[in-house]
Every structure is written in structure tokens, then in C-alpha cells.
Image (cartoon, rainbow, N blue to C red):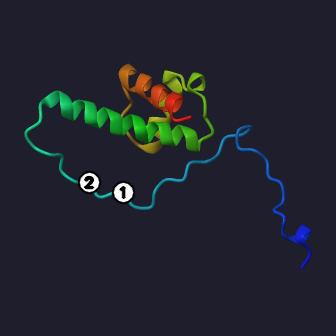
């Protein structure tokens, strides 16, 4: 078989158009958080998890740059994936995750 026949066909970049989100088939099994920590630790931990979920959903939908992720966009994505709307602090954390993942 000639090598030219094995070449993949060119595809359109997803950066030019949005991509539908693939929602997970089954939710991840939740485990209890470790006991005995200060309340602020739990608040920060849950905020980081939420920011990570939102950053992944934004990246999957074609938003790659932090300046594209305004608070309204992040909150719309939260509604789309079925989580409570994030606070301004969480939105800021989402943009920070997108910024430093490069």
C-alpha cells in the first residue's frame, strides 16, 4: 500500500468553531473529604475543584485563552454542565488555571 494512502485527511481546526461538550456517561464516585481541617480548607478545596471542572469544560468548548472567558461565559458554561453559577473569585481562578496550563 502506498504511503500516501495512509495519510490522514486534513481537518478543520476547532479553534474556529465551537465544539459540543461531551458530558460524562456516569458521575465520578464521590469520596468523603478528610475530617479535622479548618472550614476554610474545605471551601478552598471545593472552589478549586469547581474551577478545574469549568476550565476543562471551557477548553472542550473551544475557549482557549483567558481573555475569552468572561464571567458571563464561565457562568453560562456552569449552567450547561449542571453546576451552580460560580462566584467572581471562582471565575478569576478559572482564568488563572487557563493561563498557567500553557
> Tag 1: Cα neighbours inside 10 Å, few (<14), some, or many (≥20)?
few
Residue 32: percent from left, percent from top: 18, 50
Q: Is the N terminus in the top left, top right, bottom left or bottom right quadrant?
A: bottom right
Which residue occupies the foreground of this view, 56 or 70? Answer: 56
Disc 2, SS? loop
Q: Report which residue position mark 1 lands on.
A: 27
Asked whether, in this view, residue 42 is left or right of residue 88, the answer is left
Q: Which residue occupies 60% across, 25% down?
A: 68
Disc 1, SS? loop
Quadrant of residue 7 within the rendered picture: bottom right
Asked whether, in this view, residue 44 is left or right of residue 12, the answer is left
Residue 101: percent from left, percent from top: 51, 35
Q: Report which residue position mark 2 lands on.
A: 30
Q: Which residue occupies 84% across, 60% down?
A: 9
Residue 93: percent from left, percent from top: 41, 26
Residue sticking out furthest to the bottom? 1
Quadrant of residue 78 within the rendered picture: top left
> Tag 2: Cα neighbours inside 10 Å, few (<14), some, or many (≥20)?
few
Which residue occupies the foreground of this view, 71 or 98? Answer: 98
Amino acid at each position: 500500500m502506498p504511503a500516501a494512502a495512509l495519510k490522514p485527511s486534513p481537518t478543520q481546526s476547532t479553534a474556529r468553531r465551537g465544539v459540543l461538550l461531551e458530558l460524562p456517561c456516569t458521575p465520578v464516585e464521590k469520596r468523603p473529604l478528610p475530617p479535622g481541617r479548618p472550614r476554610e480548607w474545605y471551601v478552598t478545596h471545593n472552589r478549586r475543584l469547581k474551577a478545574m471542572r469549568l476550565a476543562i469544560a471551557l477548553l472542550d468548548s473551544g475557549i482557549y485563552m483567558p481573555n475569552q472567558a468572561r464571567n458571563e461565559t464561565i457562568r453560562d458554561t456552569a449552567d450547561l454542565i449542571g453546576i451552580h453559577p460560580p462566584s467572581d473569585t471562582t471565575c478569576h481562578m478559572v482564568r488563572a488555571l487557563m493561563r498557567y496550563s500553557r
